[in-house]
Amino acid sequence: VEEVIEQADYLYGSGETEKLYRLLVQHKNSNDAELLWRLARASRDLAQLSSTSAEEKKQLAYGALEYAKKALEKNESNSAAHKWYGICLSDVGDFEGIKTKIGNAFIIKEHFQKAIELNPKDATTIHLIGIWCYTFAEMPWYQRKIAATLFASPPTSTFQEALRYFHMAEEADPNFYSKNLLFLGKTYLKLNNKKMALLWLSKAKEYPAHTEEDKQVQKEALELLNSM
């Protein structure tokens, strides 16, 4: 198992998404939480590629959720298993409509918070709670209306709360993720603080692009800077 994990981490670091998935999917019946959450992540990364068809994206998303769930069953105190369960549950919501997405939101946040409890230095999970807050702060009124009819107290948040998490993530691991820089800029824009928005969007635009996501971030940061 250790050898496979070492090989998997090397492939992940090299951005070899397809090879990584092929390596780990052979171990889908494993009882090792460390292997299973990595398989969940690899399935999700493969689903995110622009070359993956819509049908495959859906299959991979549901597969990823199964692997993350199994990782949690094998080890409840594995921080990464909680994190990836939350991420994969959120992805599946995209296929199941607004009602499921809002219903799952509470569960997702709980898993992210559990992941941080188990690993307080994990900047990515702190960032994800920031995204959660940003999403609900930005939620359009008609979705709020749906949420209010479905739940006695639907999920709510503010841009200030989102900002706090994005800054906490940055403190835990400075410059760790292009998207955190982008969202710092976007949140400051929402709060009408153009000076700080300019600072963080410029950092996002200049972040070295290693992945497809980084390139998307650069593009969005540039568009926002041009529109300011």
Image (cartoon, rainbow, N blue to C red):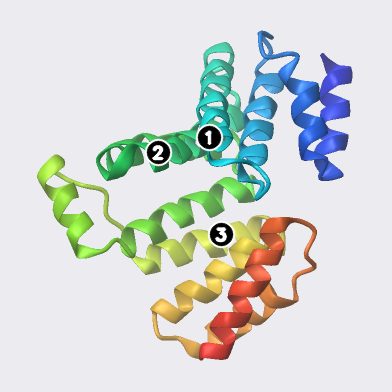
Mark 1, Cα crowd under 10 Å, few <14 / some 14-19 / many 20+, is: few
Residue beneath the point at 48% across and 36% down: 86
Amino acid type, mark 2: Phe
N-terminal label among 3 and 2: 2
SS for dot 3: helix
Out of 182 and 78, give the one closest to the viewer. 182
Q: Nearer the viewer, mark 3 or mark 2?
A: 2
The spot of residue 221 in percent (x, y) is: 61, 76
User: Tag 1 or tag 3, which sits nearer the N-term?
Assistant: 1
Q: In this figure, which residue is indicated by the disc labeled 2?
A: 95
Q: Quadrant of residue 141?
A: bottom left
Tell me if I can see residue 17 in this picture.
yes
Q: CA distance from mark 3 to mark 2?
A: 31 Å
Identify which residue is drawn at 33% across, 57% down.
Answer: 136
Instruction: Look at the numbered disc 1 and give the secondary structure of its residue.
Output: helix
**Front residue of 199 and 40:** 40
Disc with the residue nearer the chain's start (2 vs 1): 1
Q: How far apart, in angstroms, are the residues tagged by discs 3 and 1? A: 37 Å
Where does residue 104 sit, x and y in percent of width and height? 34, 36
Q: 10 Å neighbourhood of mark 3: few (<14), some, or many (≥20)?
A: some
Mark 2: secondary structure: helix
The residue at 39%/62% (across/down) is 161
How many numbered circles are shown? 3
Q: Quadrant of the N terminus?
A: top right
Disc marking residue 168:
3
Q: Is residue 152 visible?
A: no
Q: Nearer the viewer, mark 3 or mark 1?
A: 1
> How many residues crowd around disc 2 within 10 Å: few (fewer than 14), some, or many (20 or more)?
few
Residue 47, position as x, y percentages in the image? 61, 39
Q: Amino acid at mark 3?
A: Met
